Amino acid sequence: MIDNLESDYNCANAGDDLPQLKQELATLRGQGDESKETQERINHLENQISFIMNKCDINH
């Protein structure tokens, strides 16, 4: 799992990283846990996914 993304992120890793991030996000959303910690993790994952998609010019 990627914890910190930097501006020098290698887009060659996006093919592996994005599915992993999206799977973790789907799992968290599916649990129905509305705790603050879970919501923060969901927000973090959404931000990571957006960062990679924007940086690597992915339009899915």
Image: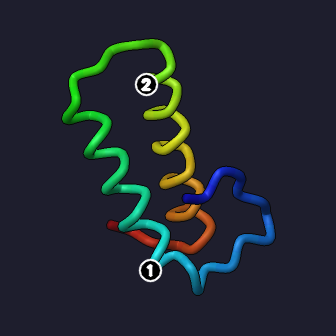
Q: Residue at x 27, y 44 (%)?
A: 27
Instruction: From the image, state whether disc 2 or disc 1 is nearer to you.
Output: 2
| Residue bearing the label numbered 2 | 38
> Under tag 2, what secondary structure?
helix
Camera-side residue of 1 and 17: 1
Please state if 9 lies on the left or on the right of 8 as rendered.
left
Please state if 59 lies on the left or on the right of 36 as rendered.
left
Camera-side residue of 1 and 16: 1
| Residue bearing the label numbered 1 | 15
What kind of residue is marked 2? Thr
For residue 1, what is the image quadrant?
bottom right
> Under tag 1, what secondary structure?
helix
Q: Which mark is residue 26?
A: none
Q: Is residue 45 above or below residue 38?
A: below
Check whether the beta carbons of the residues at disc 2 and disc 1 lie within 8 A of each other: no
Q: Is residue 29 above or below residue 46?
A: above
What kind of residue is marked 1? Gly
**Seen from this angle, which residue lies furthest top?**
35
